[in-house]
Structures are given as structure tokens and as C-alpha cells.
Amino acid sequence: MDVEATTENPAATGADTIVVGVFEGEDVAHDLAGRALGALLDSGEAQREFKRLAVTHADGVRAILVGLGDRGKFDPERARVAAAVAHGRARELGTRTLCWEVPHHVGADVVEALVEGTLLHAYRFERYKPSEDSRSVHRLLISAHHDVSEPARIAT
């Protein structure tokens, strides 16, 4: 899987699926057109509870909203788990390019963990038994307001 960092808005990256994490007690930092992500939370279909997923579509982009739980308990291991859960759903949906929007006010260790969790979940040992399921994510984009290319590179 190719991994790249970008400062572009996730919806503008050309990714067919974006992942947005939301913490308990917080709203979505950058919603999609028509408040698609906020509407998922308002309806109860999406929850801020750790590892809870919901999927929606807006402006031709699929979005996975993943609950990150309590910000105070969020650490690199929880980021790895959230990334793995999101990757699993993205793979089921036939995603080719996945873009994670890095949550605000997290460190480089969380960026590394998002990449690691995605890559670890994507691993398949198929030397002796080839997969019958050809769906796989080919490209991972990590989107943040600042340059996160170094933590993304370290994680690969």
C-alpha cells in the first residue's frame, strides 16, 4: 500500500473514502456538504464511542465516521485500533484510496499509529492460499493542517 501525507482537505484529495474520527463530547471538526457527518451523529446512527463506525456519502465521496472515545484516553494504541477498524470497513466497501483526516491536537505518535494500524490490518499472508477476495486498499492518504510526512514515513 502506498502511503502519502497531504495538507489538502480530505474531500479534495481524490480519495474515494475518507475517515473522520470524532471524540466524545466533541463535534466533527470539518463536516462534509450538507452536514452529512453531523447528521449521522444527530440521528444516533453514528456514535462517538470508541470503535463505533457509520458510513455516509456526500459530494461523490464515501465517508466513514469512527468514534474515538474519550480524548483523555486516546493514545497511539487506540489510534492503531481505530485505524484497523476503519480499514476493515473501507476494504469491505471496495475502497481503493483511503484518506484519514488526522484529529486536531494530536501528536506525531498518533499519526504514526494511524498509518501502522491501517497497514497492519491490510496485511494478508497468502503465499500458500491466495485470497479469493481481490478487494484491497491500494493507497493511504494522511491529511492534516500541518505537514505530517515525517511521521507517516517513519510508520512505513
Image (cartoon, helix red, strand yellow):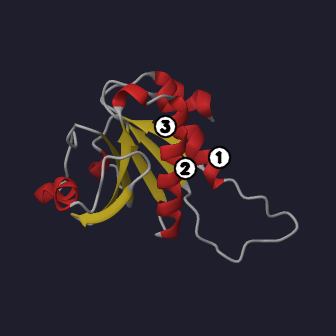
Instruction: Give the mark nearer the N terminus: 2 vs 3.
Output: 3
Query: Dot 3: what SS?
Result: helix
The amino acid beneath tag 1 is Leu
Closer to the eye: label 3 or 1: 3
Q: CA distance from mark 2 to mark 1?
A: 7 Å
Mark 2 touches mark 1? (CB < 8 Å): yes
The amino acid beneath tag 3 is Ala
Horizontally, residue 63 falls left or right of residue 77, namely left
Instruction: Give the mark nearer the N terminus: 2 vs 1.
Output: 2
Q: Is residue 19 above or below residue 95?
A: above
Horizontally, residue 2 falls left or right of residue 95, namely right
Residue at (23% x, 37% y) in the render: 25
Residue at (52% x, 30% y) in the render: 76
Q: Which residue is mark 1?
A: 120
Q: Residue furthest bottom?
A: 132
**Quadrant containing the C terminus in the rendered view:** top right
Residue 24, image x, y percentages: 28, 39
Instruction: Give the mark nearer the N terminus: 3 vs 1.
Output: 3
Residue 15 visible here: no
Residue 141, image x, y percentages: 45, 44
Judging depth in this view, the residue of 48 and 58 nearest the camera is 48
Tag 1: Cα neighbours inside 10 Å, few (<14), some, or many (≥20)?
Answer: some
Q: Which residue is mark 2?
A: 84
Residue 68 in which image quadrant: top left
Judging depth in this view, the residue of 152 and 46 nearest the camera is 46
Q: Which mark is residue 79?
A: 3
Residue at (14% x, 55% y) in the render: 35
Query: Dot 2: what SS?
Result: helix
Query: Dot 1: what SS?
Result: helix
